[in-house]
């Protein structure tokens, strides 16, 4: 089922869709072309097949960019052997084979990444290639100050959770202290989403670093314009008290790099504190919205936490040797401390990475019960399903033009009350759709500088400066 409320579209000049299709996507494709070029020319032992397939991919991406910029029709995605293509192409037909500048935003943006992925899947040598991998690693390197700050903080938190400071304290006092940490970790995890790479086309590395530090986070608390975090705390606390043996929390991941790092801190916090006994992570199956997590990104995060050499950008060059160490031994020591602790608690998590093609389908999560009934049933077994980020939020709400005061529980349709699923969305706002705001808040934010004023555009919600934390108890 899809909602009756119409979706945002690329032909609406007041929607961020308009700018995305015209200004952002061409840049993203160009960066992809650059990356494949670099890989072709950097690979020493490449066979001639490898090189010619690589060049062919570059040509196809250039053609795609041309079609996009010249507002051509979206063409059916060629068969690459995967079962999800058919649904993409059926929906394309149902939409009347639209043009790039006049198409629902959600469908066309998903189509863009699925189409690019088919170019790789149809080769022999590039099937598993992640054209955004290099960018993801390089941004993680620029996040180093925030990573180190958070590593140090996480070390304190884990030590204090297990520590002696709790001796002699009542359960009540302990819980109160724990609740403060819970809130802190969730806020870190929330703002970790502000810095995804698909928006990097208009953010500098310095901007990113500013967004990630702890001072920025405190200052940003008032920018969380709807906040149900308390309800999630109550749910997990109650489950822990109930003595139930398995208490699972799921995280539908968004971006790799700093955000994935914060998600892993959250996952190990939940386990160490006993608020969950198991955490399941849901990554994507194809390179997606530039920075989204693929299974191999977790390995690369482990490398960052255990190998000094990877912090040097020169390590990207396969011909480089004797790479100088750019990170200090002390810094590396703290990272390794966390890594040991963390992957101790997370051994399970790595086993329970659960990819599913549903997460990279073009439709919204309104279709979960009908399109992916097994996944739907599985999520019902979880105490809490955390959806990270902007795109997941757009999919929860079907990217529809809801009035901002529409209750969250209503805007998520079949995942709302009675669904058997507890939903918690942690999202910094980078698109038009926002629901669950008190009367008057949208108007107030529009009236601020850069908020959109009376242009009809909800510009305040486009930049990641504001956030929402929203909950729906489908088990109640
Ligand atoms: O709005 C910009 C945008 O790139 C959207 O296209 C997309 O929904 C989102 O940001 C990606 O952000 P996130 O990584 O938080 O899902
Ligand atoms: Mg993302």
Image (cartoon, helix red, strand yellow):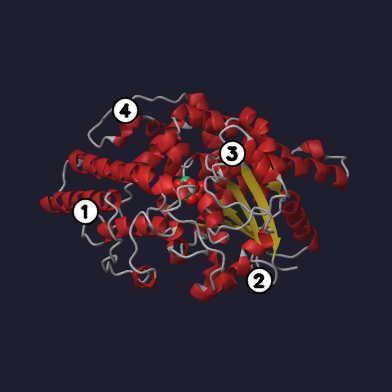
Q: Which one is earlier in the sequence, the residue at label 1 or at label 4?
A: 1
How many angstroms separate mark 1 from mark 3 (CA)? 41 Å
Residue 185 x %, y %: 66, 42
- Ligand 1 has an atom within 8 Å of the beta carbon of the residue at disc 1: no
How many angstroms separate mark 1 from mark 4 (CA)? 35 Å
The structure residue drawn at horizontal position 64% and vertical position 28%, both measured from the top left corner, is 215
Residue 193 x %, y %: 54, 43
Q: Which one is earlier in the sequence, the residue at label 2 or at label 3?
A: 2
Residue 361 visible: yes
The structure residue drawn at horizontal position 41% and vertical position 58%, both measured from the top left corner, is 110
Residue 366 x %, y %: 55, 67
Q: Is mark 1 on a helix, strand or loop?
A: helix
User: Which numbered marker is on residue 453?
Assistant: 3
The N terminus lies in quadrant: bottom right
Q: Determine whether 321 is above or below 229 in the image.
A: above
Q: What element carries label 2?
A: loop
Residue 206 x %, y %: 47, 26
User: Which numbered marker is on residue 60?
Assistant: 1
User: Which numbered marker is on residue 419?
Assistant: 2
What is the crowding at mark 3: few (fewer than 14 residues within 10 Å), some, or many (at least 20)?
some
The residue mark sitting in front, 2 or 3, is 3
Residue hosting label 4: 323
The structure residue drawn at horizontal position 69% and vertical position 50%, both measured from the top left corner, is 437
Q: Which of 5 and 152 is in front in this view?
A: 5
Q: Is label 2 in contact with label 1 (beta carbons under 8 Å)? A: no
How many angstroms separate mark 2 from mark 3 (CA)? 38 Å
């Amino acid at each position: 089922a899809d909602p009756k409320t119409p979706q945002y579209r690329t032909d609406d000049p007041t929607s961020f869709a308009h700018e995305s299709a015209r200004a952002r996507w061409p840049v993203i494709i160009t960066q992809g072309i650059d990356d494949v070029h670099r890989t072709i020319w950097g690979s020493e032992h490449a066979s001639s097949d490898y090189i010619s397939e690589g060049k062919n991919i570059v040509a196809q991406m250039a053609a795609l960019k041309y079609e996009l910029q010249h507002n051509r029709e979206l063409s059916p995605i060629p068969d690459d052997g995967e079962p999800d293509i058919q649904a993409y192409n059926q929906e394309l037909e149902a939409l009347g084979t639209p043009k790039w500048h006049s198409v629902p935003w959600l469908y066309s943006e998903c189509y863009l990444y699925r189409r690019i992925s088919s170019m790789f899947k149809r080769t022999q040598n590039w099937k598993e290639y992640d054209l955004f991998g290099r960018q993801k690693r390089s941004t993680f390197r620029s996040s180093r100050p925030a990573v180190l700050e958070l590593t140090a903080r996480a070390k304190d938190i884990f030590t204090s959770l297990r520590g002696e400071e709790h001796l002699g304290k009542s359960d009540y006092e302990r819980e109160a202290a724990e609740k403060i940490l819970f809130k802190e970790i969730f806020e870190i995890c929330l703002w970790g989403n502000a810095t995804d790479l698909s928006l990097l086309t208009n953010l500098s590395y310095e901007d990113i670093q500013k967004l990630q530090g702890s001072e920025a986070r405190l200052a940003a608390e008032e920018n969380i314009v709807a906040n149900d975090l308390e309800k999630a705390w109550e749910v997990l606390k109650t489950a822990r008290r109930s003595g139930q043996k398995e208490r699972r929390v799921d995280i539908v991941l968004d971006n790799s790099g700093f955000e994935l790092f914060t998600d892993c801190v959250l996952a190990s916090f939940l386990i160490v504190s006993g608020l969950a006994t198991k955490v399941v992570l849901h990554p994507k199956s194809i390179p997606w919205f530039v920075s989204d997590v693929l299974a191999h990104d977790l390995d690369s995060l482990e490398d960052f936490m255990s190998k000094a050499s990877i912090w040097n950008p020169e390590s990207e060059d396969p011909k480089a040797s004797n790479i100088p160490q750019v990170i200090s031994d002390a810094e590396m020591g703290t990272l390794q401390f966390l890594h040991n602790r963390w992957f101790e608690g997370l051994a399970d998590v790595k086993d329970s990475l659960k990819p599913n093609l549903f997460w990279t389908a073009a439709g919204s999560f309104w279709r979960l019960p009908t399109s992916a009934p097994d996944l739907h049933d599985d999520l019902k077994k979880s105490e809490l399903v955390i959806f990270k980020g902007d795109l997941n939020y757009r999919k929860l709400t079907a990217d529809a033009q809801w009035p901002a005061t529409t209750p969250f529980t209503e805007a998520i349709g079949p995942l709302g009350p009675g669904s058997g699923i507890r939903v918690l969305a942690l999202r910094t706002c980078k698109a038009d759709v926002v629901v669950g705001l008190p009367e008057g808040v949208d108007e107030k934010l529009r009236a601020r500088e850069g908020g959109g004023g009376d242009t009809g555009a909800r510009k305040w919600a486009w930049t990641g400066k504001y956030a929402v934390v929203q909950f729906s108890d489908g088990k109640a």
